[in-house]
Image (cartoon, grey):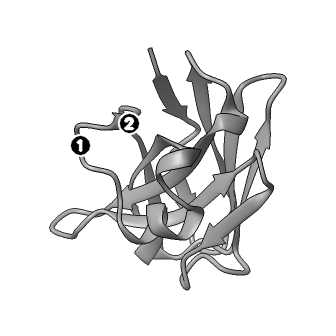
Amino acid sequence: QVQLVEFGGGLVQAGGSLTLSCAASGFILDHYVIGWFRQAPGKEREGVSCLSSGDSSSYYSDSSKGRFTISNDNAKNMVYLEMSSLKPDDTADYYCAATPRLLTTVQAMCVNPPTLLGSWGQGTQVTVSS
């Protein structure tokens, strides 16, 4: 069983930094693409960054490039999203999701988020104040 738990969200001021963590269990990270997604009130869920640790490929949305970094620690079965230079527009609930590598690519997963029937965590809230 694939299980994901996000944590690390909170309230930060614009320009600040925050690191989100996704704790994975029930699968080997290298066999999956892990994606970070976010959803703000009244908006569609959007891909932020996706990582395939098995082939060291990653994808970043235009808004996250240069500000966010996705990484993994396979020994701990963790995936991280380091966020810096945060903006109020980054305010959202952040979720991680997992899809087998054989079924997707980092770009495809981020551009076309998995359905809610897939493997998702419960989310962690990020609020960036101005």
Q: Position of residue 106 (x, y in %)?
A: 58, 62
Q: Residues within 10 Å of mark 2 (few under 14, many from 20)?
A: many
Q: Which mark is residue 120?
A: 2
User: Mark 2 is on which residue type?
Assistant: Trp
Indicate the secondary structure of the residue bearing disc 1. loop
**Quarter of the picture holding the N terminus:** top left
Which residue shows up at 60% across the image and 76% down it? Answer: 64
Residue displayed at 53% across by 52% down: 35
Q: Nearer the viewer, residue 94 or 12?
A: 94
Give left or right: position of 47 versus 56: left
Q: Which residue is mark 1?
A: 116
Residue 112: x, y in percent? 35, 66
Q: Is residue 68 left or right of residue 122?
A: right
Mark 1 and mark 2: span between their CA atoms? 7 Å
* The furthest residue to the left: 42
User: CB under 8 Å between callouts 1 and 2?
Assistant: yes
Q: Is residue 105 above or below residue 10?
A: below
Camera-nearest residue between 52 and 89: 52
**Quarter occupied by residue 122:** top left
Q: Is residue 14 above or below residue 62?
A: above
- Count neighbours of disc 1 (C-alpha within 10 A) and say few if under 14, some if 14 to 19, many if 20 or more: few
